[in-house]
Image (cartoon, grey):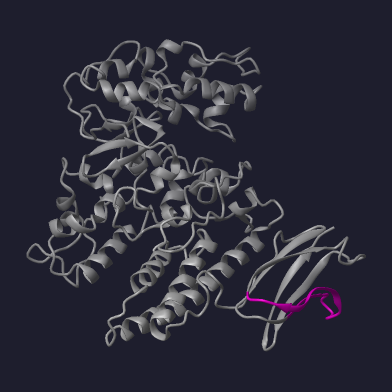
Amino acid sequence: MKTRNYFLIIPSVLCLLFLQNYSYAQTCQSCHSTEASLWSSSKHANSQNDVASELSTNWIGQTPDSVIVGSQAEDCISCHSPRAVTVKGGMTETQAMGYFFSTTNGKYTDTTKAINTSDWPNVACETCHESDMKTFGAFNSKTGSYDAVKTANDLCGNCHGTVRHPDTDHRIYDAWLSSKHGHKGQDDVAGELAGSHSGETPSNVIAGEDCIACHAPTSVTLNGGMTEAQALGNFFSTSNGTFTSSTSPADTVDYPNVSCIACHNPHDPDTLSYFNSSTKSYQVMSSSDQLCGQCHGNLRFPDTDHLSYNINSGTGGKGVPDITSMSGTKCIDCHMYNTSVDGSNSAMYRGHTWSVFVKEPDGSVDASCTKCHSAMSADSSMALVQQWKNNFQTLDSIANAKVTAAANHLKTSSDSSYFEEAQFNMTYAESDESGGVHNHLYSAALLNDAISKADLIVTGIPTKDLNHPVAFNLSQNYPNPFNPSTKINFTIPHSGNVTLKVYDMLGREVATLINGYKSEGNYSVDFNENITTKGLSSGVYIYQLKEDKFIQTRKMLMIK
């Protein structure tokens, strides 16, 4: 794994020098060669061609003035190269648009291209660093001065959010603010410190759980630089140097949360990087999953109880076969889905809410599930997710009761066979923290294993053979809506006579899919309108699973 050093506090020596051709990286590289080199290969160092492409595609027939102050103005200069207004003794944003991009008779055409490229400053060092190079500031191309910012996040939000331009369609910063990465993280840590670390010093906590490393790694760069323990003591109240039951957030203004620059090296933002608060350097990641797994898995901290990354891989259970339910699917495929529909929140947020479901301005909802499962709707996706959560909650409640009973039994028995595995698998399933959504089959297998082994300890007889179901379950059909076929999965915990029938909304039976004796296990049945029954119209149908006293029904939608 490659490590890159990064310094947020930049000395002013030599950085105050200006070159007439505005090659700021060449100026700064005298002292900051690593940062300048990274910047030179990033998008921040090649912003003129992007603007030229936009002008020649979407602004044909428009004047430079229209781009800057027109009714549909985008003001390309303010974000793509704000210091362009300082070129050639100074100019307005409109003049800069005309100087750096070709026009015909004063208007942009489909042949508009970048010109005077040697003078174009790009998004250079002095765009984000004030003249002393020690202070963050956003250079404002309208005023020719710096706008103060509280944190690096607010700095990024000037162009990657609505901080400066309320009507922009670049809203990554706003999405981040609405996510757990962007808020409530400090409250969560404070609650943990007050609840589980009362009486401990910041150094004690860092040696154990190291909250800073994942909840606010870039906090160590503040106040001139500090250690993780110092950061923990700075941002959370203590009494006589120790945390107490009344510990609460402190300095909430400067607390960076999981900031933009926790995952993006600002000098090389397009390379996946993890900021290590212990070494105060960036580690380049080989994949997005590896980046997520630093904090949502055990890639950095082997003893962590945040194991979504591990559960998703479907490995690590004790005595439970590996299960990979969505092979090849990455964390970001579900949590950073972008519909790319112009004007949609999904496109403007670019996945930075990290939510599987994104509410659009018109009240509709986009679901990342539909990216791979085109037959699914947002509603059916939400129903399936909720079903998985309900199933997991039921199994987890049973597992907790069974494992507790096993622990009590062992107080009067020396036979501890299987207890460690039962407890481990139950805790492992719970550590996913998605409520059983990440790799649902594997999570259920872990809990079923824990239940069976706990029963074996108490009674000497497992409830089921390991990994067999312990409860009835009728799954939502998939795909839904469907045309003409769909799949229905169900599980039964013991042998018996089972029926699975389909009815219309008037209660009339339209198909019998199962009618007979079935052994315990997992089953999958295809319902094909063209084969099972014919002549059905579009609409809602009900399918019902019945065994003795157990009855469960669900709805499905056929669209022709």
Image quadrant in which the N terminus is located: top left
Q: In percent of the image, x 66 and y 71: which residue is there? A: 490
Q: In percent of the image, x 24 and y 62: which residue is there? A: 249
Q: Position of residue 139 (x, y in %)?
A: 34, 31
- Answer above or below: position of 193 versus 497: above
Q: Nearer the viewer, residue 394 or 249?
A: 394
394 left or right, relative to 475: left
Q: Position of residue 59 (x, y in %)?
A: 62, 26
240 left or right, relative to 318: left
In the rendered image, which quarter is residue 537 located in?
Answer: bottom right
Q: Position of residue 169 (x, y in %)?
A: 54, 41
In the rendered image, which quarter is residue 122 located in?
Answer: top left
53 left or right, relative to 218: right
- Answer above or below: position of 230 versus 139: below
Q: Nearer the viewer, residue 248 or 278?
A: 278
Q: In percent of the image, x 60 and y 63: which residue is there? A: 382
| SS majority, magenta | strand
- Answer above or below: position of 515 versus 44: below
Q: Position of residue 357 (x, y in %)?
A: 56, 57
Magenta stretch contains residue 514: yes
Q: Which residues are magenta?
A: 498-520
The residue furthest left is 240
Magenta stretch contains residue 251: no
Can residue 162 be seen in the rendering of this structure? no
